[in-house]
Image (spheres, rainbow, N blue to C red):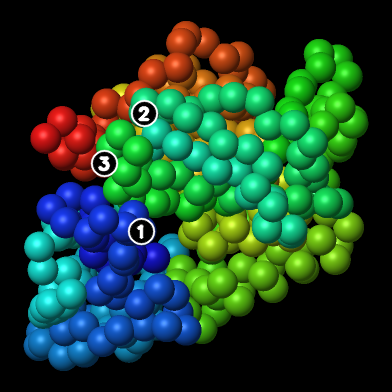
Amino acid sequence: MRQFLITVAAILGTTSLMAQESERLYLSGTDKDHTRTWEFFCTGGMNSGRWTTIEVPSCWELQGFGTYNYGHDRPHADEQGRYRYTFKVPSSMKGRTVYLVFDGKTIATETDIIDLATGRQVATLKGDTAVSGHVGGVKPWSPETPWRYEAVVRLMKGRKPLHVYRQRFGFRTIEFRERDGFYLNGQRVMFKGVCRHTFWPESGRTSSPALAIEDVNLIKDMNMNAVRMSHYPPDEYFLDTCDSLGLMVIDELAGWQKQYDTDVARRLVCAMIERDVNHPSIMIWANSNEGGFNKDIRSDYTMLDPQRRKVVEPGRTAEPQGPLRPCRHSRHRLLRRRIESHLTQ
């Protein structure tokens, strides 16, 4: 499901004395139940050859366009969809730096850890572009007790807060013991789960938070505690649901029956970990589908993931290798340079 959005980096080009949070304006809708109307042109099949309209996000075959292909039809459908949308940046964004992006977050120098159940602040961590420290008395995340906290991250210039970013996460420990098994928070746990595709009969690959909740509850109702993302990372709200309801996740690099070349694979690994790294439900990374996986990127996962989670392939588990390093393909590098430039002014 493709989403388009504007992220406003309020910390750049603003004269406000108050810390501001990033503002998002979705040019598309957010899910199958909340769409926006775009202009659309399909090059072949049903309702093709003319500009009309379509709801976004959606799968055009299920909106009456192109060729409905059941996967093994010959010849394969080869139409293209062209989208067009005209928008105006709201006047309230005047004087701010506006980014047209697919996602957005920022760096920080001060972080408050808040217990979501009680609203109590349990710690404050400080640093330059990364923070670390000890937080005592926390309740660990598990499928039975999916306890979560919220990090409130502030970008500081001296004592002045310029920007605020919020991220929910959980505390828990993961351990693989050779010839023994998997341990979560010191307790041996057996994975009992299923593979899940993002799919719904009426909307295809376009899902929604309501469907995510229905799927997670269905899996748990079958007395299962885990799900493998086959064969791509899911929508963020599915991971949010696994976090909040308590379902362990194997997050898988997008792929099918052939491996990506190394440059493309590295970009995809970076994007997946950068987006999903703080979800407590993710126990393991999977290096693409069993039909094809690039062996050259095995170390990328653990070098990018501060939690050093295991990486699995068919018949193999990769051990953490090399020091942590930032992703050189990060879509946030430009924003980070702009922020650092702003802080030195």
Question: Is residue 237 among the parts visible in the rendering?
Answer: yes
Residue 161 in the image: state x and y as whole percent.
34, 46
User: Residue at image x 76%, y 23%?
Assistant: 175
Residue 21 shows which numbered tag? 1
Q: Are marks 2 and 3 in contact (CB under 8 Å)?
A: no
Secondary structure, mark 2, is loop
Location of mark 3 (residue): 331
Amino acid type assigned to the residue bearing label 3 in the image: Arg
Q: Nearer the viewer, mark 2 or mark 3?
A: 2
Q: Within 10 angstroms of label 2, few (less than 14), some, or many (20 or more) residues?
A: few
Q: Is residue 1 above or below residue 126?
A: below
Viewport quadrant of the C terminus: top left
In front of the other: 281 or 57: 281
In front of the other: 19 or 148: 19
Secondary structure, mark 1, is strand
Residue 129 shows which numbered tag? 2
Name the quadrant containing residue 69.
bottom left
In front of the other: 215 or 61: 215
Is residue 320 shown left or right of residue 218?
left
Q: Are marks 2 and 1 in contact (CB under 8 Å)?
A: no
Please report whichever mark, 2 or 3, sits nearer to the chain's N-terminal start: 2
Q: CA distance from mark 1 to mark 3?
A: 19 Å
Please report whichever mark, 1 or 3, sits nearer to the chain's N-terminal start: 1
Q: Within 10 angstroms of label 1, few (less than 14), some, or many (20 or more) residues?
A: some
Amino acid type assigned to the residue bearing label 2 in the image: Thr
Viewport quadrant of the N terminus: bottom left
In front of the other: 326 or 22: 22
Residue 238 in the image: state x and y as whole percent.
58, 60
